[in-house]
Image (cartoon, grey):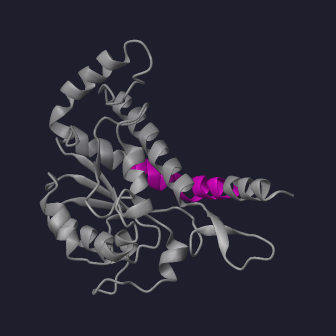
């Protein structure tokens, strides 16, 4: 069997596990998201380094939510040079305060934080400080990985222990899951695929709830479809008070 096939088989099993274990949690977060928007609040997504890719997955894309705001702070995104600086900075808990202070996020908003290990200072401190400010926090993390890892935050807490809601990405310790014969280190991580599945199913559940409540869903149309630019411009105007990335 090829390693490609092995990886796909593992991913299929992981997606099934994710569905069975997290469907209700995704639905619950969708309710919180729609409630937040209906009550005048804003929705944010945050992660460090590769975890931050979910913040980019969530916003400004076809079929995605117009009201999904990314938090992409300097030094924690993958365009940082040298990129190893992201690993240093994500452990400095105090940077979370600077990030929150420079983000137009406030009481009543929703903050989704993605951290696979859930152990580093910035995501943990982001959750702790956000909750102090009256912001609802939801974690996307690997409970297996996180429970096996000591916290790097001074509180001794990991992300799943300091958030209002937790979604498990059903990942394994170290994230990578495939062993190649003759090589000790694992390859082929799962967190990006699982995280994207969570983000996009969350979007689908939220859209269904908007429709159910008689609210036009704030969803992007492809700019490469005729009329897409005009449609999206109307969405931007309608939801401009919930958007921070324009």
Residue furthest toward the top?
226
Q: Is residue 28 magenta?
A: yes
Q: Nearer the viewer, residue 219 or 78?
A: 78
Q: Is residue 130 magenta?
A: no
Q: Position of residue 181 (x, y in %)?
A: 81, 73
Quadrant including the N terminus = bottom right
Q: Nearer the viewer, residue 213 or 198?
A: 198
Give the residue at the far right of this rendering: 1
Q: Is residue 230 above or below residue 168?
A: above
Q: Residue at x 60, y 71 (%)?
A: 172
- Dominant secondary structure (helix, strand or loop) of the stretch shown in magenta: helix
Q: Is residue 166 visible?
A: no
Identity of the residue drawn at 35% across and 41% down: 59
Relative to 28, does residue 98 appear above or below in the rendering? below
Q: Position of residue 43 (x, y in %)?
A: 26, 47
What residue span does the magenta drawing correspond to?
13-29
Where's residue 119, x and y in %?
Answer: 40, 78
- The residue under the point 29% across, 64% down is 75
| Image quadrant where one finds the C terminus | top left
Tell me where residue 91 sits by quadrant.
bottom left
- Image side of residue 77 versus residue 117, left or right: left
Of the pair 164 and 63, the residue shown nearer to us = 63
Q: Tell me what residue is drawn at x 39 percent, y 22 percent.
A: 223
Q: Position of residue 97 (x, y in %)?
A: 17, 69
Left or right, 223 with respect to 170, comes to: left
């Amino acid at each position: 069997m090829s390693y490609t096939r092995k990886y796909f088989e593992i991913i299929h099993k992981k997606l099934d596990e994710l569905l069975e274990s997290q469907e209700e949690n995704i639905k619950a977060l969708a309710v919180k998201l729609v409630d937040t928007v209906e009550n005048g609040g804003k929705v944010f997504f945050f992660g460090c380094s590769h975890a931050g890719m979910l913040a980019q997955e969530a916003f400004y894309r076809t079929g995605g939510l117009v009201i999904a705001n990314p938090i992409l702070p300097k030094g924690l995104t993958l365009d940082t040079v040298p990129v190893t600086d992201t690993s240093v900075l994500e452990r400095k808990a105090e940077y979370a305060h600077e990030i929150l202070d420079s983000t137009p996020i406030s009481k009543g908003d929703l903050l989704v934080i993605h951290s696979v290990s859930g152990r580093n200072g910035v995501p943990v401190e982001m959750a702790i400080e956000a909750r102090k400010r009256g912001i609802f926090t939801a974690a996307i993390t690997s409970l297996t990985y996180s429970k096996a890892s000591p916290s790097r935050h001074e509180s001794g807490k990991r992300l799943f222990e300091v958030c209002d809601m937790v979604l498990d990405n059903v990942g394994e310790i170290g994230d990578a899951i495939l062993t190649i014969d003759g090589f000790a280190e694992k390859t082929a991580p799962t967190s990006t695929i699982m995280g994207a599945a969570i983000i996009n199913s969350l979007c689908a559940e939220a859209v269904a709830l908007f429709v159910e409540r008689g609210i036009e869903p704030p969803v992007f149309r492809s700019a490469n479809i005729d009329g897409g630019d005009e449609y999206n411009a109307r969405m931007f105007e309608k939801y401009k008070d919930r958007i921070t990335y324009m």
